[in-house]
Amino acid sequence: MTLETAQAKPGVSGSVLKTVAIVTMLIDHLAFFLRGQIPFLTNTLFTLSIPNITSKEITLYYIMRSVGRIAFPLFCFLLVEGWKHSSNRFRYGLCLLIGAIVSEYPFDLVNFGGLSFKHQNVFFTLFLGLIGLWLYDRFRDIRVIQALTLIALFVVAFFLKTDYSIKGVAFILLIYVAQTELLVIGFIGCVLFQIASFPAYLLIGFYNGERGYIKGPVLKYAFYAFYPVHLMVIYLIQQAFS
C-alpha cells in the first residue's frame, strides 16, 4: 500500500489529520501532566495477561498515553506535506521557530515548574526536521555534504535535547525520502514510537491530499497556538490542585 494509491481514493483531509493529532496530543498530556492531580488515572482497570509470557496492569493513564502515541507521527507527516506544498518555505520555517520560542516557557513550566534548558519542546524538533528537509534537497546532488550536514543536524537535536531528539528528526526525513512506501514508514514508526502509534499510519494511508476545513490565517495560526496555550492551561490546573 502506498501513499500515491491512498491519495487516489476518497479519504481524510489534512485538517482531519491535524485535528486527530491535536486531540490525541491533548489526551496524552492530560494523563502525563495531571497524573498527580487525578489519582484514579493510575488505578488498575484490568490485567492483561499472556500465559507464560507477560502480565500488564491496564490503567486509564496507560490507555491515554497509548492514544497519545498517535500524535507525533501525524505531526511529522503534516510537516512534510507542508514543506512539499508551501508557497513560502521561509515563512513556514519562521512560524515553526516562533512557535518553538513562544512554547518553551509554558513547556518548561508544566515540566519543571520554571524556565529550564533540560529539555526542549516538540516545535524545536519540527523546526530541525524542516531544516533537515531543506538540507536534503539543497545537497541532493552532493551526497557527502548532504550526509555531513544531516549528521550535524542530528548532533544539534541530541545536544539541544529536543522532544524525540534524533529519532524525531530522522523520522521526518524518512517520511520525506520514503513518502510512497507507507508500509516502511509504518513499520519503522512502530519501532521508534511504539506499536500504539499504528493508527497514525492507517490514517495517513487514507489521506486524500486535500487541505480540508482548516483554512485561512485565523484557523491556521490557532493550530500553532494550541500547543503553548494548552500547556499553560495544564500548568494552571496543576497549580490549582497541587
Image (cartoon, rainbow, N blue to C red):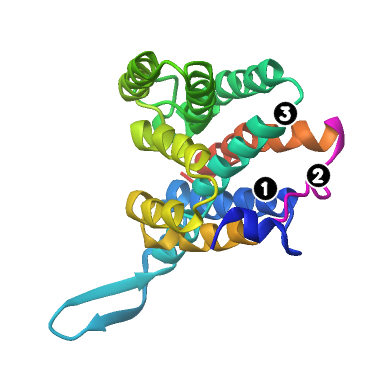
Q: Which residues are magenta?
A: 207-217
226 shown above or below 59:
above
Quarter of image, res 207 = bottom right
175 shown above or below 45:
above
User: What residue does disc 3 label?
Assistant: 86
User: What residue does disc 1 label?
Assistant: 18
Q: Secondary structure at mark 1?
A: helix
Q: Are marks 1 and 3 in contact (CB under 8 Å)?
A: no
* Mark 1 neighbour density, 10 Å: few (under 14) some (14–19) many (20 or more): some
Tell whether position 94 is magenta: no
Q: What is the spatial separation of the Cα atoms under label 1 and label 3, in whole angstroms?
A: 16 Å
Q: What is the spatial separation of the Cα atoms under label 2 and label 1, in whole angstroms?
A: 9 Å
User: What residue does disc 2 label?
Assistant: 214
* Mark 3 neighbour density, 10 Å: few (under 14) some (14–19) many (20 or more): few
In the image, 73 versus 120, the foreground residue is: 73
Q: Position of residue 78 (x, y in %)?
A: 62, 41
Q: Position of residue 121 (x, y in %)?
A: 47, 29
Q: Residue furthest bottom?
A: 51
Q: Residue furthest left?
A: 52
Task: Give the main secondary structure of the magenta stretch.
Answer: loop
Q: Secondary structure at mark 3?
A: loop
In the image, 193 versus 151, the foreground residue is: 151
